[in-house]
Amino acid sequence: MDSYSIGYANIALIKYWGKKSKDPVLPYNPNLSLRLDKLYTKTKIEKSESGQDEFYINDERQGADELKKIITFVNKFTPENREKIKIISYNTVPTAAGLSSSSSGTMALVLACNEYFRLEKSTEDLVKIAKEGSGSSCRSFYKMASWLEDGSVHEIKCDLDLAMMVLVVNEGRKKISSRKAMEDCVQTSSSYADWVKQARQDYKAILDALAKNDFTKIGKLTESNALAMHSTTKYANPPFSFLEEDSYLAMDIVKSLRSKGLEAYFTMDAGPNVKVLYLKENQKKIYEEILKVWKKKIILCTE
Ligand code: ADP
Ligand code: DP6
């Protein structure tokens, strides 16, 4: 089969940060995301000629650990006696840099398996399968989605034309994966219980703000939720941080936009790169202002 399946990245406004259960995968707190249609993964599956399962990202053969992780997941929902496969995948975003390659990659993989093995699953079933591969990927099936503590995934209606750009601080692979980092925070961070409490409140508040089209409130909650997530890493044992010097510079730039009357808010995931949330109608002005002071790469994420 020659056609690729496409999976999209999503960025959480209210973060998923910790598993209450690993099997099935359930988050400790409700979370909510915006899909970024310009950041995607395309994946296709072919019959393996080597007699072994193989996994390629951007033409690079993945090592034993990555292969094992992916194949363990694939085996959960494909036929027991399946033939050996070659998974060929291309990420448009840097892999494992906090730009959500896990969500776009997992969505694309699930769709590609559905095609190749003719599983004929419904979207609801594919969503359930995807979260067992990578929690955040279940949200990528909808433009805006929430994933709740009971495991259910919901499409969220939003009348605002929300958009994002990324101020790229570092495209390199992070030293610690999202999975390991969140696990360390659940187990050792003295602020983890506070995080869960805060995130549950933030989730309720953002639903209210979305219903009222209150962008200022949505933006403020997005920022404070990201900062609360990152503070759990500071109080982990040992402490660690995903943020770099330029991440702080990027946050300052976003704040200074607001003092000029341009409404924009930041959020960061498990990586140093800073995403900027704004209303699409302001994209041109915001981009021009940022270009004056940000000398590194910028990725516009929405059409
Ligand atoms: P990110 O911030 O990019 O989401 P994570 O640490 O959360 O980084 O996840 C990176 C992991 O996501 C990779 O190690 C790999 O297991 C998975 N992943 C990335 N790209 C793909 C892909 N194209 N297909 C399948 N899985 C992928
Ligand atoms: C910081 O979904 O990559 O991006 O379920 O272990 O695969 P696993 O983790 P993953 O974690 C995403 C964490 C986050 C926040 C978010 O997207 O909600």
Image (cartoon, rainbow, N blue to C red):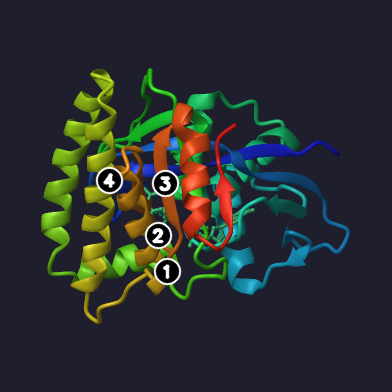
Q: CA distance from mark 1 to mark 4?
A: 20 Å
Whole-percent x and y of residue 278?
40, 36
Query: Does 95 sit above or below residue 289?
Result: below
Q: Is residue 173 visible?
A: yes
Q: Where is mark 1, residue-wise?
A: 246
Task: Tell which circle, 4 or 2, labels the residue nearer the N-terminal end.
Answer: 2
Circles 4 and 3: CB atoms closer than 8 Å: no
Is the CB atom of the residue marked by disc 1 within 8 angstroms of ligand 1's nearest atom?
Answer: no
Q: Ligand 2 closer than 8 Å to the CB at disc 4?
A: no
C-alpha gap between disc 4 and disc 2: 15 Å
Answer with the quadrant where ligand 1 appears in the image.
bottom right
Q: Nearer the viewer, residue 195 or 153?
A: 195
Q: CA distance from mark 4 to mark 3?
A: 15 Å
| Tag 2 residue | 250
Real-space Cα distance between discs 2 and 3? 9 Å
Q: Position of residue 35 (x, y in %)?
A: 49, 36
Q: Which residue carries the number 3 mark?
A: 276
> Residue 301: x and y, percent?
55, 41
Decide if ligand 2 comes within 8 Å of the CB at mark 3: no
Res. 78 in view: no
Q: Which mark is residue 259?
A: 4
First reached walking from the N terminus: tag 3 or tag 1: 1
Disc 2 residue type (three-letter): Ala
Q: How far separated are the C-alphas under marks 2 and 1?
A: 6 Å
Check contact, mark 2 vs mark 1: CB within 8 A: yes
Q: Are marks 3 and 1 in contact (CB under 8 Å)?
A: no
* Label 1: few (<14), some (14–19) or many (≥20) C-alpha neighbours in 10 Å: some
Q: Residue at x 71, y 31 (%)?
A: 118
